[in-house]
Each structure stands twice: as structure tokens, then as C-alpha cells.
Amino acid sequence: MGCGSCGIKPNGCKSNGGCNTGSCNRLNTYDWLYNMPVADIDSSCKVVEVSFNNGSRKDFFRNVTLQQFDKGDMVSVEGVSGFDVGEVSLTGEIVRLQMKKRNVKEENPEMKKILRRSSDRDLEIWKQNKVREPQAIIRSRAIAKQLKLEMKISEVEMQADGRKATFFYIADGRVDFRELIKVYAGEFKLKVEMRQIGARQESAKVGGIGSCGRELCCATWLTDFKSVNTAAARYQNLSINQTKLSGQCGRLKCCLNYELDTYLDALQGFPDNCDTIQVTKGTANLIKRDIFRNLMWYMLPDSTKQYPLTIERVKKIKSLNEQGTIPEELEAVELTSSKPQEVEPEFVDVVGHISLRSLEKTDKKRRQQNQQRQQQQSHNKQQGQQPNKGNQNQQQKNQPQKKQPPPQQRPPQKRK
């Protein structure tokens, strides 16, 4: 049985049935190299990817121990003046691909190390400090509001041993939080690290389901956040509707950039400076470009009808306008739908030859007879009358008559 969030039971998952431990809430990379044999153990990858806080933060650690870790194992790694606890998310050769993607060198001497497999004591301390995070968010927001700082505390992540806390905040500009750090250190009795993130990073940490019905890209696989502007929507002939084009972060959706390169390549075959063309009826304005049919749609003034024109026809009209000639007609293309027409199925009487009206008439007639019989019986009881003799005679006639035995014959008497 797969996990509830991803539908795939990851290799090394310790749960049986539905996963309720949060170990794979943000499973974004499937280890498809897991079952491949290792040719040379010495040349195998010694780096392991470890995720923290249910996958909201991931980092690479060097495995200097003699143990082999699988996906889903809890490990204790080096932290700031202590240790931290995370979950192994990737192992083996696929880690090298992820490091190449994030421009991380495998021979980096500053890379932190894995200390050991997490013991019961480590997990107990880690859970105790994780319980403090929700209350720390509420208190830190109140302190920032008291100091009148234009910032929002998005998330507080505490180290497993409780010696350090990272405060993720959102702000439009630069914030002088030197006084804030002193107050936080005195309030929470730990080392404070402030880290500024954007709205897209906050949405990635919170997670959720997008309008497409799938988990947010920023919360699963997307790591490089590029700027998205309204020009991407215009190139794809999308209506500029801020409500529909905005994601849960309040910014334009990242998926607007996915097909932008395809549209830009297709639009290279369309002529430039053809937003308006002149015909006898007036100036036709360009409405949209259809890259799938290679058509350009124009609309004449004082009319709501749209005229599809081929690219060759638009180029010809534009060249005539430059020469001072105004053509009479646009010569729009007649579009025919290639989709086969659906034939409406004929009505079929599934009831058969039985007419529902006849059944209704029979039922109505039966009800009327029952009502008349009940009225007659109630009337006879009120008048105290006996049933008609005619009816009794008729009933007697209808009853079968019993045969009477023949009379007994008397014996003849003798004469004296």
C-alpha cells in the first residue's frame, strides 16, 4: 500500500500501510538507481541527502561512518555547537545528480558530516524541541510587532538539541533586526539566526494543492525560482486575470514559464508590426495569434466579429498598405471543425409495450371503487338499515344448495 501523499512507498519506508509519520510528505525525487549494483565501492558516492522539517529544507552530508543508510533512516548530523536530526531522503549515485543540479562539489571540505544513526535519546530531545516551534512563532511575531518592524515571521525551525533556532521572515525591504536578535536570544535562551525568504519560498514551506489538482511545484521539485511577469501570459494569449494567474503565494504562477519557450519559438514565424492593417471598411486591430493553426485574428471597428487571416494574407495586406494601397476585403479563412459530430442517440422505450397511462387509469379506477364502498358502508351504519333483501336472495342463489336426504318410508300396516 502506498503512502497517502505520493502513492508510492519509498525504498526504506518503515511504515506498513498508510504513512502517518510525515516521512514522505514532500517526496520529490524517486531513487530510480536504488537497485543498481555498485561496480566499485571505493568510487561510490559517500554523500547523503538529508531532509529536515518534513522536507522543507534539504542539505548534503558526508557519510564518514562505516554504516550504510537507506531512505527513511533518521540520522544525527553536525549542527551549530551541537547536533541536528534529519531523515535520509536520497542515497547512492542519484545524489551526485542532485549535487550537480545545485552546483555543490562532492570534494567540498566544508561539507558537514553524519555523526551516527539517531538513538532513542536523540529522537526524544528532537521531539521535545519540535513541540516548542508553534509557540515560538506566535511569540516571535508579537515581539516583532512590538518593535514596529515591517516583517513577517513565516517559520521557526529549531535545532534538534535546542541550542539554535532559525527564524525565516518575509519583508519587502531591508530590516534592521539587531535589536530583535537580542530580544529573541534573551526570550528563547538559544542562538538566533535570521534568514529572509520570498513569498514563493514561504509557499514552498507551507505546501498545498494547486488549481491543477496536484501538489505545488515549489513544495515538491522546483528549486530555482525565476521571475514571472505578465508578458508570459500575453505571449500565450491568456487573459490578464490576476485572480486566475496568481498562485497561493500571491505571485504569478511559476507554470506560466513552462511553455513560454515553445510559444516564443512558434511566434518567430509571425510577422512583426502587424497590430493594425488598413482595409476599405476601416482599420483592423489584431486580437490574438493562433500558433496551432498559424492564423491571426483581427476585428474591424464598430463590429464584434473576429476574422481569422493566414500569415501570407496579413503580410500581403501590410505590404499593400506600405505602398499606399488599401485592399477591399480581409479575405478571412473559413474554419471547419475537424472534430467528428456526435450523433444524438434515439429514444428507446425501456418500459416496453406497457403504457404508463393505462396503469394510471386502472389504479385511479380502483381507488374510486374503494372510496364508494367505504362511503356506502358508513351510510348504512348511520341509518341502521339492514342490507337489501335482494342482495340476500342473490347471495343465496349464488350459494350452492345442499341436497336434502330422501324421506323415510313407513312400513305398510296390516289390516285387522
Image (spheres, rainbow, N blue to C red):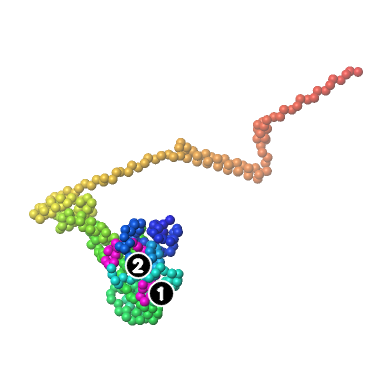
Residue located 57% across and 40% down the image: 369
Residue 29 percent across, percent down from the top left? 34, 60
Report the residue marked by disc 1. Answer: 161
Question: Pointer 1: residues within 10 angstroms few (<14), some, or many (20+)?
Answer: many
> In the rendered image, is residue 246 in sight?
no
Find residue 170 and report its image quarter. bottom left
State whether residue 221 is above or below residue 77: above
Report the residue marked by disc 2. Answer: 63
Membership of 83 in magenta stretch: yes
Where, quadrant-wise, is the N terminus in this rendering?
Answer: bottom left
Left or right of 332? Residue 356 is right
| Front residue of this view, candidates 356 and 14 | 14
| Front residue of this view, candidates 371 and 103 | 103
Q: Which residues are magenta?
A: 78-106
* Mark 1 or mark 2, whichever is nearer to me: 2
Residue 121 percent across, percent down from the top left? 45, 71
Residue 401, label in figure? none
| Front residue of this view, candidates 258 and 98 | 98
Question: Pointer 2: residues within 10 angstroms few (<14), some, or many (20+)?
Answer: many
Left or right of 109? Residue 385 is right
Residue 252 percent across, percent down from the top left? 29, 64
Report the amino acid beneath label 2.
Asn
Mark 1 and mark 2 residues within 8 Å of each other at the beta carbon: no
Q: Label 1 vs label 2: CA separation?
A: 21 Å
Residue located 34% across and 72% down the image: 168
Report the amino acid beneath label 1.
Asp
Membership of 387 in magenta stretch: no
